[in-house]
Amino acid sequence: MARGPKRHLKRLNAPRHWMLDKLGGIWAPRPSTGPHKLRECLPLIILLRNRLKYALTGKEVKYILMQRLVKVDGKARTDVKYPAGFQDVISIDKTDEYFRLLYDVRGRFAVHRVSSEESKFKLARVKKVEMGAGAIPYIVTHDGRTIRYPDPLVKAFDTVKLDLETGKIIDFVKFDTGNLAMISGGKNTGRVGIIISREKHQGSFDIVHLKDSAGHVFATRLSNVFVIGSGNRPMISLPRRKGIKMSILDERAARPPKM
């Protein structure tokens, strides 16, 4: 085997949710290493070229980014393959547009337009709470941040609200029954529901049961549950379907009739 990191990604091996066409070439952009995993991110080149249609080619994307026009979580990023991921805020000050990356009910990234007020914060899921050198407590979030001296009540699986300018925690929501959560992995990705119960399985995966606003009950692993609000009030605005998955028949009924 060759030594060193892999630098290429074939188009057929690219994640399905990028929605790249099969015949558009052999290669796909391989995301740089960063805060989100390769299969759980959206590189900036795909965001600007394929989703927002601000560029026609990769070269144009590079020209845009090199002018430091695009910010991810308040920081200008110039790498075309920078991995933006779940809950990241993309700001384009020149056009006064702000987007938050969320999931739709089909498990694809929804580039959700938000107000400039909402773009000043983001939600982050706490992966672990630990004690560092000199007995300094810190938390690690889903987007690779290390935050020292958190509130002592913050535990793993809770969600913290971060001010993007300072990087400080301004609020937090406990992982608790009765709170609103979005699913960020697995078959139910993108669905939003209220946590009903949590089943503990020794030596296996804990299972969480949720109920959406349409009354459908579904279950997923604990690691896929991302709390987004206390009670049934979300702290962020949700994409078009509000996280409710419809059956194929319901979708057909909701579609306008063909003329």
Image (cartoon, rainbow, N blue to C red):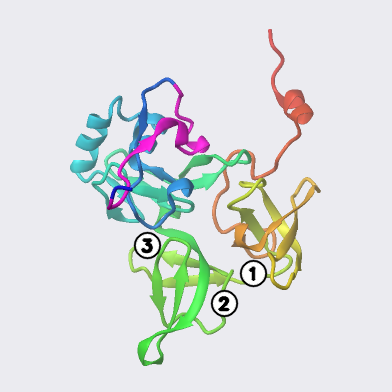
Q: Is residue 177 left or right of residue 116?
A: right
Where is residue 137? Give x, y as percent: 44, 85
**Disc 1 element:** loop
**Which residue is disc 1 drawn over?**
175
Which three-letter amino acid code belongs to the residue tagged 2?
A: Lys
Spatial CA distance of label 2 from label 1 is 9 Å
Most extreme residue toward the front is: 1
Q: Which mark is residue 20?
A: none
Which three-letter amino acid code belongs to the residue tagged 1?
A: Phe
Number of dots carrying numbers: 3
Q: Earlier in the sequence, mark 2 or mark 1?
A: 2
Where is residue 215? Give x, y as percent: 81, 48
Looking at the rendering, which quadrant does residue 60 occupy? top left
**Residue found at x 22% / y 30%:** 59
Residue 207 in the image: above or below residue 33: below
**Which residue is disc 3 drawn over?**
164
* Residue 225 seen in the current view: no
Spatial CA distance of label 3 from label 2 is 21 Å
Which three-letter amino acid code belongs to the residue tagged 3?
A: Leu
* Residue 94 seen in the current view: yes
**Which residue is disc 2 drawn over?**
155
Q: Which residues are magenta?
A: 3-22
Spatial CA distance of label 3 from label 1 is 22 Å
**Disc 3 element:** loop
Q: Main secondary structure of the magenta part?
A: loop
Binning the other alpha carbons within 10 Å of mark 2 as few (below 14), some (14 to 19) or many (20 upward) gives many
Q: Nearer the viewer, residue 165 or 148?
A: 148
Asked whether disc 2 touches disc 1, contact meaning CB atoms under 8 Å apart, the reply is: yes
**Residue found at x 62% / y 72%:** 174
